[in-house]
Every structure is written in C-alpha cells, then in structure tokens.
Image (cartoon, grey):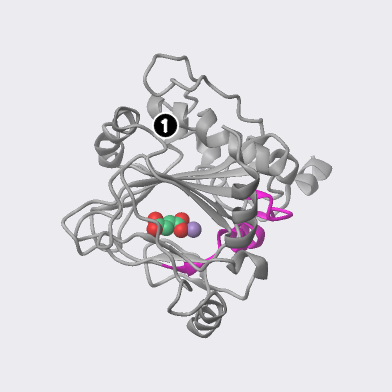
Amino acid sequence: MKLTPEQLEQFDRDGYLFFPGHFSPEETRALTDAVPELYSRREAYNVREKGKDAVRTNFAAHMYSTPFAKLARHPRMVQPVMDLFDEEVYMHQFKINGKAAFEGDVWQWHQDYGTWMNDDLMPTERAMNVAIFLDDVNDYNGPLMFIPGSHKKGVVDAKHDLTTTSYPLWTVDNDLIGQLVERAGGKNGGIVAPRGPAGSMILFHSCLVHASGSNLSPWHRVAVYLSLCAVSNHIRRPKRPEYIAHRDFTPIGLLPDDCLLKDYDVDLPWKDGLPASALQTSSVPFDEMKKAA
Ligand code: SIN
Ligand code: MN
C-alpha cells in the first residue's frame, strides 16, 4: 500500500491519517477473539485501571500471541510507515488498550515522543504511532482526540503525572492545550476525533498532542496501539521494562497481506512467560554499559 502525494501532504499538515475499515471484519475478529484470554492473565504486562480489575493496557502481545504477532508484521500497517521514513522500522511499543465499557479511564493530553525522549533516550521523532480499532469507535466510548497540526510544535512542556490514572504519563498542562486548540481552529476543527468501524486504522505523528475521555457507554473501545521506530533512531537507554519499551532493534520482516486469515509461522519468544531480563531496567545508556563491560 503506497501513500498518495495528497496523503503525504495531509500527514505533514495535520499530523495524522485515518483509514476507515482498513482491515476487514474477518481480519479484525481474528484479533478481537484473542483479547479476553490475554486480559485474563495475571501478568506484569497487564496494567489494570486504577482500583479496578478492567485492563487499561496490555503490553507486548506480539511477543506471545500468534494473531498479534502477525499484526505486528502486517504490510498494510508497516509499509506506509516505512514509506514515510524511507527506512526499515522496529517495534518500539505494542499495546492493546481496553477502554472497557463503563470502566475505561481517561488518557490525559500528551505527546508520545515526549516520553520516549525523556525516559528511553530516543534521539528524534522518527517513530510513528498506529492505532487499529478492534471495536467500533463512536462519540460515546472514549474516542481518541487529536489537536491537528500540534506535531509542528515539536516537543512541548510536560509534567510527569503519576497519580491521575494507573499509568504514569508526561502530560501537557491545560493552558497550553487551550492555546494549541485555538491555533488549530478553536471550535472549528481545533480538536478532532476519528470515529469508525472496527478494523479502522490511524497513523499519527509521535509529537501529535492527543487524549481520550473516559468510557461511560455500554460499549468497549478496545484498540491496538503500535509504535514503530526507524531502526537508526532506536532508543539508547533501557530505563523502562522491556515489555514497555523494546530493546530488540531488528527490522520488522513483513508477512503476506492475507496473514491474519491464514497460517504463517511467527516467532513467539515470550510464549512461556516474561523472561527476567524483560523486567530489568537501568538508568545507564546502552553505550556506557558496553564501555564498562
Ligand atoms: C495512548 O495515547 O497511548 C492511548 C490513548 C487511548 O487509548 O485512548
Ligand atoms: Mn499516546
């Protein structure tokens, strides 16, 4: 799948591209059917909503679940990102966010690259977020919201919020959000929220400011978020556990386009559980560790 010149221009201007119904209902079902069992596991990689049992985020399913390992290598998802960077990419982060009916909590306004820079020492913004809806997303079940064009501001001021939700996040303060929304058109398009059927895909820039509200509706809003990083831009420090920020910088090898519907062999290195090394962290950058060794 090649992006058109119009799509490239739109991505540069708005910081995101929306592809409604990008994966068919059958392809999407192959993924959705695997989620309840993954969420039922009592493992470090399942982060639950504050004070609740509902899963907020499942990390790294592509390391232990066949359908998600195939999604991680899907050409309809990876190829446009490689085209945009003109380089091979590796998987920096892989999440299945629950946003469960009645229980799903907010994601405060933030940029992802801020966290990757501050925590993981990722050198530049050459990493892309991809969202794939596993449920229909509507006005009521906590759609992802963007401030169009906010990626043009680069990394903006943020503070590390450790209390609002169960997941620490570098969040942007309300005054700055107000200014960015005004600059993007205020009530006329200053905030957008792509909605569409399960199987829809969004590509969004790692500096695009985004958030989502809580889900008070009776409909789940499960979505996969994949963060693909240009190989030369790999992170320089293992400060966060490996199931959150990956340390294998091997370029993603693509599977055929029908991979979600057919059997293909995929490596599942964590199928028997997380290795101890995936939990280890260090504030020392990789190159200093090598020098010391
Ligand atoms: C994220 O920003 O990583 C997740 C947002 C969401 O699930 O709504
Ligand atoms: Mn985010």
Q: Residues within 10 Å of mark 1 (few under 14, many from 20)?
A: many
Q: Does the image show residue 20?
A: yes
Q: Quadrant of the N terminus?
A: top right
The residue under the point 28% across, 47% down is 136
Residue sitting at the far bottom: 175
Q: Position of 69 compared to 87: left or right?
A: left
Badge 1 marks a residue whose secondary structure is: helix
Residue 86 in which image quadrant: top right
The residue under the point 49% across, 33% down is 275
Question: Does label 1 point to a residue whose CB lies under 8 Å from ligand 1?
Answer: no
Q: In the rendered structure, which amino acid carries the disc numbered 1?
A: Phe
Q: Is residue 200 above or below residue 180?
A: above
The mark tally for this picture is: 1
Q: Where are the magenta residues, as a range?
A: 108-127
Residue annotated with mark 1: 68
Q: Position of 270 compared to 116: left or right?
A: left
Residue sitting at the far front: 6
| Ligand number 1: quarter of image | bottom left
User: Is residue 125 part of the magenta span, yes or no?
Assistant: yes
The residue under the point 50% across, 25% down is 269
Q: Position of residue 210 (x, y in %)?
A: 48, 64
Q: Position of residue 233 (x, y in %)?
A: 72, 46
Q: Position of residue 261 (x, y in %)?
A: 36, 20
Q: Position of residue 147 (x, y in %)?
A: 51, 68
